[in-house]
Image: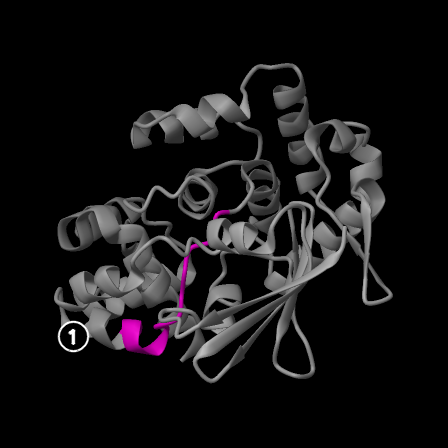
Amino acid sequence: MQEQKYILENVTSFEPIHIFDCGQCFRWNKEEDGSYTGVFNNNVLNVKKEGNKVIFQGVCEGDIEEVITDYFDLNTDYEQIKETLSNIDEYLKTSIEYGKGIRILNQDLWETIISFIISANNNIPRIKGIIERISKKYGNKIIYKEKEYYTFPDMNALGQASVEDLRALGLGFRDKRIYETTRMFLDKEITLEELENEQNVETLREKLLTLSGVGGKVADCIMLFSLKKFSVFPIDVWVRRVMNELYIKEEDENKVSKTLIQNLAKEKYSDLAGLAQQYLFYWKRDA
């Protein structure tokens, strides 16, 4: 693959720090110059914002402009989305101003499933370390600027790993879950196509919940961050906290049920609940 470069002029709703640090992806790392370098599919890309333009540079499988347009979802009008959400209330308006450059990436479904099983009861640095070790062991090497990068392994490559192999990579209790979920796909108990083609959110969630290591929050993250189901509302400690502080006002936030939060999100944010969640999550956790 040859190195390619693409410059996006006068782009709105695009801030690398907002996109890569809002919790949706784990393979982008900040460089000393403030740019970000990441691996996705069979691509290694550096992204740098300078004024009102974004510079993309790296090695891509295919035309870099097409790759970027798809992965960064450039055909979705985030200005319209933000305007709609900002009219709901002042809290959401404030959170959108804080994370105005967030975009939901079009991430590979297989990688997203495995990555978010790894994310359960885990912290970002450790998640990134585990994914990096899995990729180095079972992925393909790409050289960019004299540095080695590794693609995320497909299910056949990951299927070579035993529970013990995964344990040696530091997965902890998740080793068996990753192994079992990989076997389910290899044995055709469930397929990626089946998940991608399922339009009903509740049916899709039920199918995802059959996977080892996938609970409600992980299922919602997979649906939002890969399958672009903007109506789902993943709930973690930060989201529970911000929803309680802003709307519910229970003295002990741990007593607030996820069902109450889900119903409130559906009522207030409707089909854009997942995007509202991202703005609120980034604002609360970061600020």
In front here: 104 or 183?
104
Decide if residue 208 is on the left or right side of residue 249.
right
**Circle 1: residue type:** Glu
Image spot of residue 84 (x, y percent): 17, 61
Q: Is residue 109 magenta?
A: no
Q: Is residue 98 magenta?
A: yes
In front here: 252 or 5?
5
* Image quadrant occupied by the C terminus: bottom left
Decide if residue 163 is on the left or right side of residue 70.
right
Secondary structure of residue under mark 1: helix
Kindly tell me whether residue 218 is visible in this rendering.
Answer: yes
Image spot of residue 90 (x, y percent): 16, 74
Image spot of residue 110 (x, y percent): 59, 36
Question: Residue at point 69% right, 30% down?
Answer: 155
Kindly tell me whether residue 260 is visible in this rendering.
Answer: no
Q: Look at the picture and state if 249 lies above or below 133.
A: below
What is the magenta segment's predominant secondary structure? loop
Question: Residue at point 22% right, 52% down?
Answer: 265
**Number of residues whose C-alpha sits closer than 10 Å to that of mark 1, classed few (under 14), some (14–19) or many (20 or more):** few
Image spot of residue 87 (x, y percent): 12, 67
Question: Residue at point 43% right, 72% down?
Answer: 285
Q: Look at the picture and state if 31 lies above or below 126.
A: below
Which segment did they paint magenta? 95-106
The residue that mark 1 highlights is 90
Question: Residue at point 67% right, 46% down?
Answer: 61
